[in-house]
Amino acid sequence: METVMATPPSLRIDNLLAALDTAEIGQTPVEVHGALVGIICGGVELSKDAWIKPLLELMNDGQPLPEQLHLLIEELYQDTLTRVSDIEFGFSPMLPEEEEPLTKRVEALSLWVQSFLTGLAMVQPKIDKASADVQEVIKDLADIAQVEFDVAEDEESESAYMELMEFAKMAALLCYSEFGPDLTDPNQKEANVFH
């Protein structure tokens, strides 16, 4: 039985949405999370705040965020990093709840994947030198990002969506294992300690 870490209430999708709206940032929580995961899985340096600059480029034209939102995004980063770097904590893309119509969830997944790929590309210059496996999942993700939204609300579409979501999750973790920090390297260990 895996010990899935509960999401802190502050990081629920609706709270993040409210904070983004308040700050008048035109991005959805799904896009912010996708970009953040892309940046982490692309191997951004784990030292202090290296991830903020590329994320701000994507979120806010490189401008700083209002403090409350900044703190929330920082919390999201720590939570996401913990989940991505330790499989036991149960990483998955931040997507709308199951009660939402499937069309909306498929659209959100497509946005998440687009943002993930953008974040990945921003911090990882060697994507084209990645292993064949990683290049293939990136190509498949690019296809998912183009997915059509006229989905039927039925069991078959639901299970196809779940498969795509599972694929996006595994693809992210595969990218992290390829580009992410080598945690067996003593120099990286330091940067990875949470305070």
Image (spheres, grey):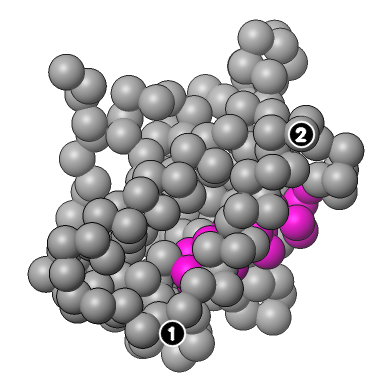
Q: Which residue is drawn at 74% across and 43% down?
A: 135
Left or right? Give the position of 1 relative to 28: left
Disc 2 residue crowd, few under 14, some 14–19, many 20+, Cα 10 Å:
few
Which mark is drawn over residue 127? none
Q: In this view, does 59 lie above or below 131?
A: below
Which mark is drawn over residue 132? 2
Rendering quarter of residue 184: top right
Q: Report x, y in % for residue 82.
A: 42, 33
* Distance of label 1 from label 2 (alpha carbons): 41 Å
Q: Residue at x 81, y 45 (%)?
A: 127
* Magenta stretch, residue numbers: 110-124
Q: Does the magenta stretch include residue 112?
A: yes
Residue reaching furthest to the front: 156
Left or right? Give the position of 24 relative to 96: right
Disc 1 residue crowd, few under 14, some 14–19, many 20+, Cα 10 Å:
some
Secondary structure category for the residue under label 2: helix
Q: In this view, does 143 lie above or below 8?
A: below
Q: Which tag is nearer the camera, tag 1 or tag 2?
A: 2
Q: Report x, y in % for residue 59.
A: 59, 75
Quarter of the rendering occupied by the N terminus: top left
Quarter of the rendering occupied by the C terminus: top left
Residue reaching furthest to the left: 99
On the image, numbered disc 1 is attached to which residue? 23
